[in-house]
């Protein structure tokens, strides 16, 4: 953060977040993606949570390109 405040850091050095979706039954990771900064991560999380509530598994997997392991 100090580097960013002094203008000496690129986006690569700023903290970021990953969004991780795991299976409930065995905890296996089915989706991991960079979520960006805190504001971007919050919006992405809201979108994923809404999709998980509203869509069936097949549609969610298709739209988010989840890879079955």
Image (cartoon, rainbow, N blue to C red):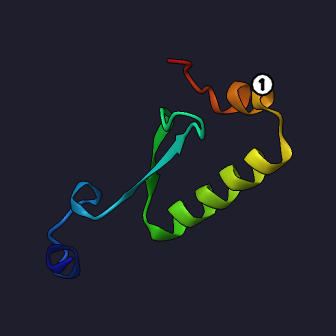
Residue furthest out toward the front: 25
Numbered marks: total: 1
The residue identified by callout 1 is 58
Q: Residue at x 56, y 18 (%)?
A: 68
Task: Determine whether the residue tagged by mark 1 lies in a helix, strand or loop.
Answer: helix
Percent from the top left, x then y, of residue 25?
59, 35
- Judging depth in this view, the residue of 2 and 45 nearest the camera is 45
Name, please, the residue furthest toward the top. Answer: 69
Apparent side of residue 5 relative to residue 32 in the rendered image (left or right)? left
Whether residue 30 sits left or right of residue 1 in the image: it is right
Residue at (69, 28) in percent of width and height: 61
Q: Quadrant of residue 14?
A: bottom left
Residue pictured at 83% horizontal, 39% vertical: 55
Q: Position of residue 27 (x, y in %)?
A: 49, 38
Q: Within 10 angstroms of label 1, few (less than 14), some, or many (20 or more) residues? A: few
The relative height of residue 41 versus residue 2 in the rendered view (above or below) is above
Q: Quadrant of residue 57?
A: top right
Q: The N terminus is located in which quarter?
A: bottom left
Residue 8 screen position, x and y as percent: 14, 70
Q: Residue at x 46, y 69 (%)?
A: 38
Looking at the image, is 8 positioned above or below residue 67? below
Looking at the image, residue 7 sits to the left or right of residue 18; the answer is left
């Amino acid at each position: 953060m100090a580097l960013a405040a002094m203008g000496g850091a690129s986006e690569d050095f700023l903290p970021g977040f990953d969004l991780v979706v795991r299976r409930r039954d065995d905890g296996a990771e089915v989706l991991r993606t960079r979520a960006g900064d805190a504001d971007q991560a919050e919006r992405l999380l809201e979108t994923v949570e809404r999709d998980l509530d509203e869509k069936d598994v097949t549609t969610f997997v298709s739209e988010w390109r989840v890879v079955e392991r």
